[in-house]
Amino acid sequence: MATEVMWKLGDLHDSISLSRSERQVRRASGLKQWQLERCLHLRSELTDGMEKQKESLLKAVWAGDVDQVNAMFNTGVPVNCQDSRGWSPLHCAASCGNLPLVKFLIQKGASVNMRDVCSYCPLHRAALNGHTETMEYLLQNGASPDMLTSSGESALIIAVASGHTSAVKVLLQYKVPLIIKDNKTWTAMQWSVISGHEDVLDLLVSVGVSLEEETSTGKTLLHLAVLAGCFQTTKYLLRKKLDVNTTDEDGQTAIHIAAENGNEEILQLLLKGGASVDALDKYHRTPLHRAASSGSDVTVKLLLQHGASVDSRDLLSMTPLHHAAYKGHEEAASDLLLHGADINAKEWLGKTPLLLAAEKGHTQILRCLKESGADLFVKTKWNETATDLALQGKHEEVLNIISVHGMNLC
């Protein structure tokens, strides 16, 4: 079969089976080059030499050696060559923010909108590192501010997420779309919140971006700020009068998230901002349930100090103490008991916190419950005792703890 026909068949195969980014790199590298790489017996000393020259060129670009770069061009290395990652000389220069070299490469015919394997263009690389002068020059010379990476990120989203306020200002001058979403359906505003860049957030607000944005799961910007543990952006959003008790599709408010994550500073901020201490999610779990389940002793104490209901029940009739016992969080359980938690409360299957601890093999909290006066003879709806549950789980140490005078309880 003629070599030319082999190449055409290979091109047809790859156009169907390869990802978009791989196809782009191979097209940009030149048809003959990658086909020769596939067919090793067709490779020559000439192509091997060109690869070495390409590597030398990119090293010179990274080093900012304009004279060496020019010398490499004079040997025939193409200005739009790409390495295995799809990086061209212009990608490298833009990433470094080397404006003189960027200008030189564009004068030599470098493509300003060439993509690498992640579909990043030189503008994306400059935005990632906050090189505003380089960005402006690329935009003035035809770089598209609307192009997206393989993750759906625009140059604006990249600049926002990286916290480069000056880079964001440059892009805003070119009327970039403000509400474009990446592949995870996140906007620039949402990225600014979770990244904790208050100055970028304020800039977006100043150009009219709404603070009422929600994710596909109904999370508000306040949910995201708390989830990311960003104190400053949480404080900023509360100053902007966002509803602190808004719920997402699971019925959780920002205070549920803060309580579960153990973020005392943000939790205090939310409570001062009017967050409901006994808010219920769709499973009827309060922030105290979530804090007890995660074992966050500090948030358990803070919620109790603010009057959280110590025996609130979720849809399975579990109290916060049940959750602490089930997960084996001794300190959280001790705090709940000190505030009057019902030590013998039963959930929907008739299990008390002690029975749950015995079932899961949590010896430390089992000792705590026993010493605090928990009923050792209690049974589930199926007449199971703590001994039965410990035997089922093969928890020998639990059996020793719940025994009375050496006798296991039956």
Image (cartoon, grey):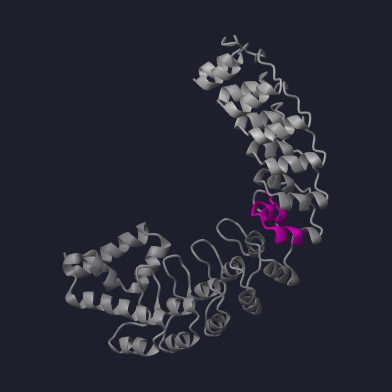
Q: Give the residue at x 36% y 62%.
A: 15
Q: Nearer the viewer, residue 388 or 283?
A: 388
Q: Nearer the viewer, residue 329 or 192?
A: 329
Q: Nearer the viewer, residue 357 or 107?
A: 357
Above or below for 345 versus 33: above
Q: Can residue 251 be seen?
A: no
Q: Quadrant of residue 88?
A: bottom left
Q: Can residue 87 be seen?
A: yes
Q: Give the residue at x 36% y 86%.
A: 69
Q: Position of residue 61 (x, y in %)?
A: 39, 81
Q: Position of residue 37 (x, y in %)?
A: 25, 67
Horizontally, is 186 left or right of 201 in the view?
Answer: left
Q: Position of residue 392 (x, y in %)?
A: 52, 18
Horizontally, is 31 left or right of 321 in the view?
Answer: left
Q: Position of residue 93 (x, y in %)?
A: 45, 80
Q: Quadrant of residue 343?
A: top right
Q: Was residue 236 drawn as part of the magenta stretch in this picture? A: yes
Horizontally, is 93 left or right of 208 in the view?
Answer: left
Count of numbered badges drawn on the protein? 0
Q: Quadrant of residue 383?
A: top right
> The C terminus appears in which quarter of the rendering?
top right
> The N terminus appears in which quarter of the rendering?
bottom left
Q: Nearer the viewer, residue 247 or 374?
A: 374
* Magenta segment, prevailing SS (helix, strand or loop): helix
Which stretch appears magenta?
218-237
Q: Give the residue at x 71% y 71%.
A: 203
Q: Was residue 369 drawn as part of the magenta stretch in this picture? A: no
